Amino acid sequence: MASLNDLVAAVATTLENNITGLAAYQYILPSSATYPCVMVQPGPGDYTPAFGAGDDKWILSVFVLTSAGGEQGAAQMELNSLITGWGPSSIRQVLYDHEDLGLTDGTDVMATGVSNYGGKYTIGDVEAAGALIKVLIHTDPQQFVVP
């Protein structure tokens, strides 16, 4: 079974390993973050899809940030390439192509949508453009449990 920590780490690792130049962080963005980057945090979990006995559902928040560096238009274009549905820098496509996140326990992942797009965010001293991608993960909590 993949723990919640395993799932967060697997999403971050999958994105970082498959999108050139993307840095991935778990839980918190460091003050010296490298851009473009994602920060992966757990969201709501649901144990009821299989009456609590065979399918945990987690929704992770993937915050996507690109450095504005004084040029908001360039940051928006880079952000768009990361949140678009398909392409070499598409977070959605990477998760689609690696739906098991490299885990062997029946885990299944998919990006479900984008929100909180636009504007300028200031992270430390860096101005960034950003958006939020929601990621749905199903995993079997009893996959490798031996009675």
Image (cartoon, rainbow, N blue to C red):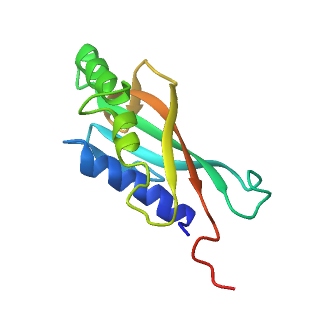
Tell me if 53 is positioned left or right of 8 in this view.
Answer: right
In this rendered view, identify the residue nearer to me: 59 or 109.
109
Whether 140 is drawn above or below 147: the answer is: above
In this view, which residue lies farthest toward the bottom? Answer: 147
Instruction: Report whether residue 33 is seen.
Output: no
**Residue located 34% across and 55% down the image:** 13
**Residue located 45% across and 51% down the image:** 28
From the image, which quarter does the C terminus lie in? bottom right
In this view, which residue lies farthest toward the left? Answer: 20
Residue 115 spot, x, y in % from top left: 52, 25
Tell me if 100 is positioned left or right of 15 in this view.
Answer: right
In this rendered view, identify the residue nearer to me: 89 or 79.
89
**Residue located 32% across and 41% down the image:** 37
Residue 9 spot, x, y in % from top left: 42, 59
Whether 147 is drawn above or below 74: the answer is: below
**Residue located 73% across and 56% down the image:** 47
Whether 31 is drawn above or below 128: the answer is: below
In this rendered view, identify the residue nearer to me: 49 or 58.
49
In this rendered view, identify the residue nearer to me: 147 or 129.
147
Residue 129 spot, x, y in % from top left: 36, 25
Whether 103 is drawn above or below 18: the answer is: below
Q: Quadrant of residue 70?
A: top left
In this view, which residue lies farthest toward the right? Answer: 51
